[in-house]
Amino acid sequence: MAFNITARASSSTANLGPGFDVFGLALDAFFDEVTLTKKKQGIKIITSDLVPTDPQKNTAGLVVQHMMKKFKIKSGIEIKIRKGVPAGFGMGSSAASAAAAAVAFNELFKLNLDANTLVECAGVGEMASAGSIHYDNVSASVLGGFVIVRTNPLDVIKIAPPSDLRLCVAVPKLDVPPKKTEVSRSVIPKNIALADSIVNLSNAATIVVGFMQKDSNLIGTSIRDIIVEPARQHLIPGFAAVKKNALRAGALGVTISGAGPSVIAFATKKSNLQKIANSMKHSFASAKIDSTVVICKPSNGAKLKKQYD
Ligand code: HSE
């Protein structure tokens, strides 16, 4: 039996506009890598990145603790984390570490878990960063592609994205508050008008059809959210201009990536992706905010090192 296992999981974008807490899309923009090594006792986290090393406060640490308890495993474990996904920017950073940890644990102890169980275990890690468990990012990082999450009971559906779907993600260099996701969830209205939910539902349904029919135009033009985005956009200086100019540059749809503050533009292989990316960077710069813009595409799910080396 193996003594240590390494797994890698990608960044992701949650919501895709109207699919709040339901839709996720794995993106090959950034990756986290987690190595689990069996030890005599205890859980120890090793990393040179700016993440907590207390297992109770660390995403991967919580996942490992949960899985040890759930599957009655008695062992010590060392967790080595290499972060590639920027933390706190709405790119599914905690989910990527959680997904890599769950997939590595599954292999290390030969648990042979199904997809829903892996997602459930990885979701526990979201407690560390978001203060609540939501499965949109972790489902995307575990399974790859486009995912739809149903809860009670947890059930995740994956659809392979169209091969020509491309995205531009602008990650603004903002000081994000420590409990950013909690903050950005607190501004969402508790009650919404039926008319607004109809608009969002129609767009969400069309996004699903777009993925099923492999129609990137249908997906992109349905990235319209009139409930959550308007409530959150004030948390992202320059958002309105970034969106307007990316659309002018040819993006099909633009919205907040997950809980923000990154902004994501949907396009196709045929779009002028560099023009869209430049327009996003310049628009943030006009608001006196530096940003990193990455052109990316949907990615596969978490992989063991032997599968991606
Ligand atoms: N769906 C969640 C939100 C994602 O928008 O709050 C958080 O990463």
Image: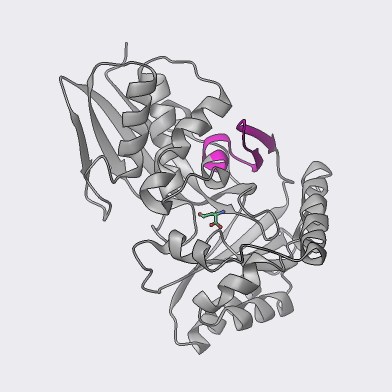
Where does the image place residue 48, in percent across and percent down from the top left?
Answer: 22, 50
In depth, the one of 112 and 197 nearer the eye is 197
Looking at the image, residue 132 lies above or below residue 241: above
Q: Is residue 5 left or right of residue 132?
A: left
The answer to if 76 sits in the magenta stretch is: no
Residue 84 visible? The answer is no
Which residue sits at x=45%, y=36%? 122
Where does the image place residue 300, in percent across and percent down from the top left?
Answer: 57, 39
Where does the image place residue 292, in percent across and percent down from the top left?
Answer: 46, 70
Looking at the image, residue 241 lies above or below residue 176: below
In depth, the one of 308 and 252 nearer the eye is 252
Q: Is residue 72 left or right of residue 307?
A: left
Q: Which residues are magenta?
A: 139-158
Quadrant position of the N terminus in the picture: top left
Which residue sits at x=44%, y=15%? 111
Q: Quadrant of residue 89?
A: bottom left
Coloration of the structure image? one colour
Residue 19 visible? The answer is yes
Which residue sits at x=51%, y=42%? 138
- Quarter of the displayed picture in which ligand 1 can be seen: bottom right
Q: Is residue 203 left or right of residue 53?
A: right
In depth, the one of 147 and 155 nearer the eye is 155
